[in-house]
């Protein structure tokens, strides 16, 4: 039986992670390559890197990070943030990422999904979705709307429709981020996650709101998510990957054991 | 020298990086002469069996791999490389290398979901899953019962003879996830993305001397 995946997410700006992890000896390290190695050794199933470098000219710095990470860890990892063209996707994949995630660019130009899937295979293309609850209304039958620019711009696009369209265009996976839950540490957006996960036939990674292992247990069972993204709960040393997986295991959620 | 066969199937560099991490030398090549001269041959791959076989045939790599197999050179197939060693693949009804009798089949998209609710099991099979060793193989040396491996695939090998099945995995059905015959071994899972257990099998291959 397939294990549920636990995926730490690292935000990288100009080659540094914006928030360092606090190791047991309380030394903060902001080097994404060192953090990748740390989480790889700790038993993470996959990693996600978001390039939040503001300037497009400095994207080569991220490519260099990706190359170093690929030489260091031997689990899948995806790279997202600022991916606009097929060439952007190719650069990231050639540098050694397993997957590339598209978000705003796909909303503006859905063809990027099908182009990427054709060129590199569906399994390489992750559709990142930022979603806000707006209530059922005209054009938004699910009550959840796609937003971009960090939640500032409403796109008049229904989240469920967009998820289905993304799958039809060839996305191999969906990373579903609730802007409402993001940063709250109050738990994932359960209604949204379950709705999307039940209606598409590709894996869904739940994102936004994780604060405790209980939150992961909820979203991986009732929420029907295939994987859960985590950030601050591990970056600040509140929990280890092993703490989370042990808890999930005790709750009957199948996870890959740490320690190998 | 280990030859990593370039048949346009992607993820070659991932495999090369893993081999290099293990301190073995490799070259990525589509030159049949270099492949035939290599001490060991790895043919990884993601993508479609049909496209893979088309490029293989164009570049004369199909005949090279068949010769390498007969010559007794250690060979390792990964993912699509584990499917194209069958006679045929359901993916575009492709005729394959025929090194192990059998076919590559598609997962049904109507297998019930494993959460007990409505819906179907998701295809592709993507993520970490177990390996049930059904027959010991030297490449499994050191692999633990609870070790898991990383899969991404919609098709799986279905050998005619159980004698060629070394490991199985459950995803809706039980399928052959590690197959082999003589000097050939192949895994449906990605050794280069399966953490330490994956690297262990890869290392075992780099040191394997089939008799």
Image (cartoon, grey):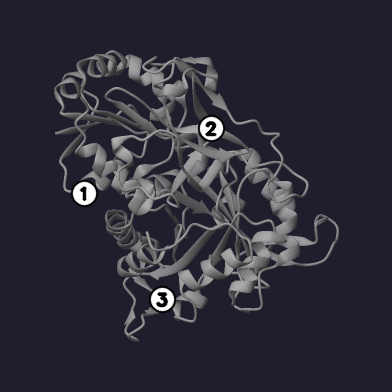
Residue A213, placed above or below residue B160: below
Q: Position of residue A209 (x, y in %)?
A: 62, 73
Q: Indicate the secondary structure of the residue bearing disc 3.
A: loop
Q: Position of residue B193 (x, y in %)?
A: 38, 48
Residue visible at 36% across and 80% down?
A23
Q: Nearer the viewer, residue A33 or A83?
A: A33
Mark 3 touches mark 1? (CB < 8 Å)? no
- Left or right of B8: which side holds A147? right
Q: Nearer the viewer, residue A58 or A175?
A: A175
Callouts 2 and 1 on one subunit: yes
Quadrant in which residue A169 is drawn: top right
Q: Position of residue B91 (x, y in %)?
A: 53, 22
Q: Nearer the viewer, residue A67 or B25?
A: B25
What separation in Å lies between label 3 and label 1 (alpha carbons)?
32 Å
Is residue A24 something one can see in this rendering?
yes
Front: mark 3 or 1 = 1
- Circle on res. A18: 3
Residue with the mark numbered 1 = B22
Q: Position of residue B7 (x, y in %)?
A: 33, 26
């Amino acid at each position: 039986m397939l294990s549920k995946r636990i995926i730490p997410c690292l935000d990288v700006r100009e080659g540094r992670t914006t928030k360092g992890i606090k190791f047991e000896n309380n030394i903060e390290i902001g080097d994404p390559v060192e953090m990748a190695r740390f989480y790889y050794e700790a038993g993470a199933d996959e990693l996600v890197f978001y390039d939040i470098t503001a300037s497009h000219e400095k994207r080569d710095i991220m490519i260099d990070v990706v190359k170093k990470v690929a030489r260091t860890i031997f689990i899948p990892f995806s790279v997202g943030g600022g991916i606009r063209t097929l060439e952007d996707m190719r650069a990231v994949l050639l540098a050694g990422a397993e997957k590339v995630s598209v978000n705003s660019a796909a909303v503006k130009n859905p063809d990027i999904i099908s182009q990427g899937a054709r060129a590199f295979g569906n399994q390489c293309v992750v559709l990142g979705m930022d979603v806000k609850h707006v209530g059922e209304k005209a054009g938004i039958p699910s009550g959840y709307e796609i937003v971009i620019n960090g939640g500032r711009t409403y796109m008049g696009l229904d989240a469920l429709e967009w998820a289905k369209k993304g799958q039809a265009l060839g996305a191999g996976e969906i990373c579903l981020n609730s802007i409402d839950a993001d940063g709250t540490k109050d738990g994932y957006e359960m209604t949204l996650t379950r709705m999307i996960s039940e209606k598409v036939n590709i894996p869904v990674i739940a994102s936004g709101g994780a604060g405790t292992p209980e939150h992961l247990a909820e979203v991986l069972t009732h929420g029907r998510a295939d994987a859960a993204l985590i950030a601050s709960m591990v970056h600040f040393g509140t929990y280890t990957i092993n703490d989370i997986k042990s808890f999930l295991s005790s709750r009957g959620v199948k996870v890959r054991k740490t320690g190998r | 020298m280990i030859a990593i066969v370039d048949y346009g199937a992607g993820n070659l560099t991932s495999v090369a990086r893993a081999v290099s991490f293990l301190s073995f030398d490799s070259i990525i090549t589509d030159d049949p002469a270099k492949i035939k001269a290599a001490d060991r041959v790895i043919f990884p791959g993601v993508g479609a069996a049909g496209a893979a076989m088309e490029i293989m045939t164009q570049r004369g790599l199909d005949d090279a791999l068949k010769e390498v197999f007969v010559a007794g050179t250690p060979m390792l197939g990964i993912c699509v490389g584990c499917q194209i060693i069958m006679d045929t693949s359901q993916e575009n009804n492709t005729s394959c290398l025929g090194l192990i009798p059998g076919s590559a089949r598609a997962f049904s998209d109507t297998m019930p979901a494993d959460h007990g609710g409505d819906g179907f099991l998701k295809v592709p099979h993507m993520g970490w899953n177990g390996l049930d060793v059904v027959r010991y193989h030297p490449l499994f040396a050191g692999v633990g019962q609870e070790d898991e491996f990383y899969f991404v695939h919609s098709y799986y090998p279905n050998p005619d003879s159980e004698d060629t099945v070394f490991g199985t995995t459950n995803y809706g059905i039980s399928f052959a996830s590690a197959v082999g015959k003589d000097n050939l071994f192949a895994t449906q899972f990605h050794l280069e993305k399966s953490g330490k257990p994956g690297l262990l099998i890869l290392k075992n291959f780099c040191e394997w001397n089939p008799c």
